[in-house]
Amino acid sequence: MMSLNSNLVPKQLSKHIVLALVVLIIGVPLNFYLFTTWQSLTKNESQPQSSVALITVANQEDDHDHAAGQNVGLAAAENNDSNAQETAVGHAKKHSDPNYVCPMHPEIITDDPEATCPICGMDLVVFESNGDADIVELTPTVINSLGVRTAKVKRSNIYRRISSVGYITYDEKNIRSVSLRTEGWIEKLAVKSEGTRVKQGDLLFEVYAPKLVNAQEEYVQALELDSGDGLLISASRSRLRALGVSLAQIEALHESKKVEQLIRIFATQDGVITDLNIREGDFIPPSKPVVNLVDLSSVWLLADIFESQVDWLKVGQNAEAQLAFMPDRLWEGTVEYIYPSLDPKTRSVKARLRFDNPDELLKPNMYANVTIYAAPKRKVLTIPREAVIRTGSQARVIVAQGDGRFKPAIIHAGVETSTKVEVIGGVEEGQEVVVSSQFLIDSESSMRAALMRMVGN
């Protein structure tokens, strides 16, 4: 009996060993193949039931292992389904707005959410649009930090003011030219140089002229041959006056009856010698001016007025002048004349302004800043001048729309003063425009509009 059992035991062990070897040889490769197939199927988002079936087939030899495998397969399938669902949500979320921009370099735009800025390496952020490309939204904190101030668009009177530059020149009404009415020789000069100041009646020069000597002789003869009617005396006296002899000299000749070889020429007004074209001994023909006298008690100021402002200009308007040598003083004058032609090079019209100059501080050829006050425009839309943003081709303002929203608006500007600008179009009465930090808001608006065009929104 013992020998029989001892014979049976080795046989049973051999049978089990053979069976185990068969399972190892066939089952391990089969399980590896099925596991690889399951991974491939789950990666390709196949139905999770296939994995369950494959795991069940691999473990069909053992009920306990079969149940365990089924549970593992279901758990894996559920986990795969959850991952697939999260991937779809994330995908939809990421592609709801496919535009991403670098916060530091707004020119870097892409639709790849995983990309980084190639310049600074920062993560890209979603570019959000508020529906209007040029509207800028600011929080109260940012508004307070920037110091944003606004002013209302309102109607008021605006006084048109013409600002220009000009130069001082002589008042031509106060220029007197002294010349001879007959040919002669300058024998004596009382004034030696230009710029000499003279008074009315001061001696300028003495001249020898044969015709003046003859006219004196005729007058003396007429006095001696007077027949009582005075016709000859009157004719001789008139000839002396026509030749430029003064009444005082004629009266002296009448009293002395002595002919003078040299005739004295006197200043006819107060003034300054501006042109002295003679020297002692010069022969002077009647056509040559001898000396010019200018009275500087009043002067002209010639100012260039732009073509667009000519219609504002009227004779009689008040004007002010300011000169560099006395910046704290203003000279008051009036528009005396507007020249009829336009300068084709400067596209401006010259206006002649007259200024009193009793102390003669205003010198000819001095430059001056000129302000002419034209008639006001009443009840027009105006905004502060500081609110206007000027570019090469247009003017615009930043309009406050409330709730921290700001939007640029192109305006058509009219008359301007030192503090206000007339608005012909672009904004309406009662709106508020930004008068400080508007350039920052405008640049932000321009950048946002450019980004919107780049991303195609």
Image (cartoon, rainbow, N blue to C red):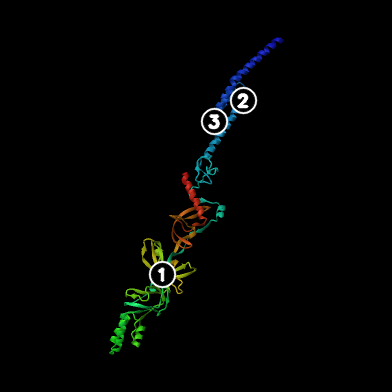
As helix, strand or loop, the secondary structure at mark 2 comes to helix
Q: Nearer the viewer, mark 1 or mark 3?
A: 1
Residue 290 shows in this picture? yes
Going 39% across and 65% down the picture, which residue do you hit?
Answer: 350
* Residue in the picture at 47% in, 48% down: 450
Image point 41% across, 69% down: which residue?
169
Disc 3 target residue: 43
- Between 288 and 337, which is closer to the camera in this rendering? 288
CA–CA distance in space, label 2 to label 3 = 24 Å
* Nearer-N-terminus badge (1/3): 3
What is the quadrant of residue 28 in the picture?
A: top right
Residue 67 marker: 2
In depth, the one of 198 and 78 nearer the eye is 198
**Amino acid residing under circle 1:** Thr
Quadrant in which the N terminus appears: top right
Amino acid type, label 2:
Ala
Residue sitting nearer the eye, 40 or 74 = 40
The numbered mark at residue 169 is 1
Is residue 238 visible in the rendered image? The answer is no
Q: Earlier in the sequence, mark 2 or mark 3?
A: 3
Q: How many numbered marks have been drawn onto this rendered protein structure? A: 3
Q: Position of residue 322 (x, y in %)?
A: 47, 67
